[in-house]
Image (cartoon, helix red, strand yellow):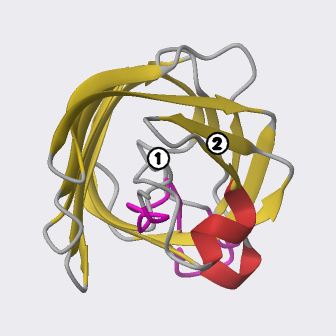
């Protein structure tokens, strides 16, 4: 059975600001990543060498992400496209599909403005989002609890790097836990 796979990073933000000297009050510095985003494409590769199980999936268009200056992030998976692909299950060739639905929130910290790192406070992850993995053995996960255990199949970035250039963004993560490695790559545009 494909075990619940570790999470790849979450899209998150850090509060950041600059303080002006004199009589003016503190004014927050603009951060490229703040605002509403929509995933245009995502890819996830999972490889569990011990279980001889690996999958590469692509898709995810339509996932909505809101990033607040204070680091609060919100995902809305409603209506998003599934991630589909192929691989092997216990060494036997197989197809895979990951479908996501409902919503998820978390607190996080992001360094930088146009590029940097993303760190989600795993204990802050909440919501009713559901992940359904279709393989030879179907798996349904509550995404919040799975992410807290490191088993979100790479669809929620937890510790990642990002780049941001005006209307586009990219989040990448590579995660290893035991015999399992997941690599994810999200591409986004401003919504």
What's the residue at 47%, 15% (across, down)? Answer: 61
Q: Nearer the viewer, residue 111 or 55?
A: 55
Give the residue number, with chain letter if any, for mark 1.
155
- Relative horizontal placement of residue 32, taking residue 17 as reference (left or right): left
- What residue lies at 54% left-to-right and 14% top-to-bottom? 81
Which quadrant, please, contains the N terminus? bottom left
2 or 1: tag closer to the N-terminus: 2
- For disc 2, the neighbor class at 10 Å (few under 14, some 14 to 19, many from 20) is many
Residue 59 visible: no
* Point 72% across, 70% down: residue: 145
Where residue 169 appears, as percent x and y from the top left, is 32, 33
Numbered circle sitting on residue 90: none
Task: Give the SS element for disc 2.
Answer: strand
Left or right: 112 as drawn, with respect to 19: left
* Magenta stretch, main secondary structure class: loop
Q: Is residue 61 visible?
A: yes
45 over 38 or under it: above or below = below
Q: Residues within 10 Å of mark 1 (few under 14, many from 20)?
A: many
Residue 185, horizontal then vertical, whole percent? 25, 40
Give the farthest residue toward the right.
128
Q: Position of residue 177 (x, y in %)?
A: 28, 82
Residue bearing the label numbered 2: 131
Quarter-of-image position of residue 94: top left
Residue located 68% across and 29% down the image:
77
* Image: magenta residue range: 3-27
> Residue 106 lies in what quarter of the image?
bottom right
Q: Are circles 2 and 1 on residues that touch, CB within 8 Å?
A: yes
């Amino acid at each position: 059975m494909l075990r619940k796979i570790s999470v790849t990073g979450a899209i998150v933000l850090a509060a950041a600001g600059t303080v002006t000297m004199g009589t003016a009050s503190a004014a927050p510095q603009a951060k490229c990543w703040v605002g509403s985003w929509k995933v245009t494409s995502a890819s996830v590769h999972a490889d569990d060498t011990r279980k001889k199980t690996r999958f590469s999936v692509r898709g995810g268009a339509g996932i909505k992400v809101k990033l607040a200056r204070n680091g609060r992030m919100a995902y809305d998976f409603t209506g998003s496209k599934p991630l589909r692909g192929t691989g092997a299950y216990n060494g036997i060739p197989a197809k895979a599909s990951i479908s996501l639905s409902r919503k998820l929130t978390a607190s996080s910290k992001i360094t930088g403005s146009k590029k940097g790192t993303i760190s989600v406070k795993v204990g802050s992850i909440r919501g009713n989002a559901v992940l359904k993995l279709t393989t030879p053995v179907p798996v349904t996960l509550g995404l919040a609890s799975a992410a807290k255990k490191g088993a979100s199949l790479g669809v929620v970035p937890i510790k990642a790097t990002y780049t941001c250039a005006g209307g586009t963004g990219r989040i990448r993560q590579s995660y290893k836990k035991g015999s399992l490695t997941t690599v994810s790559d999200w591409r986004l545009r401003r919504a």
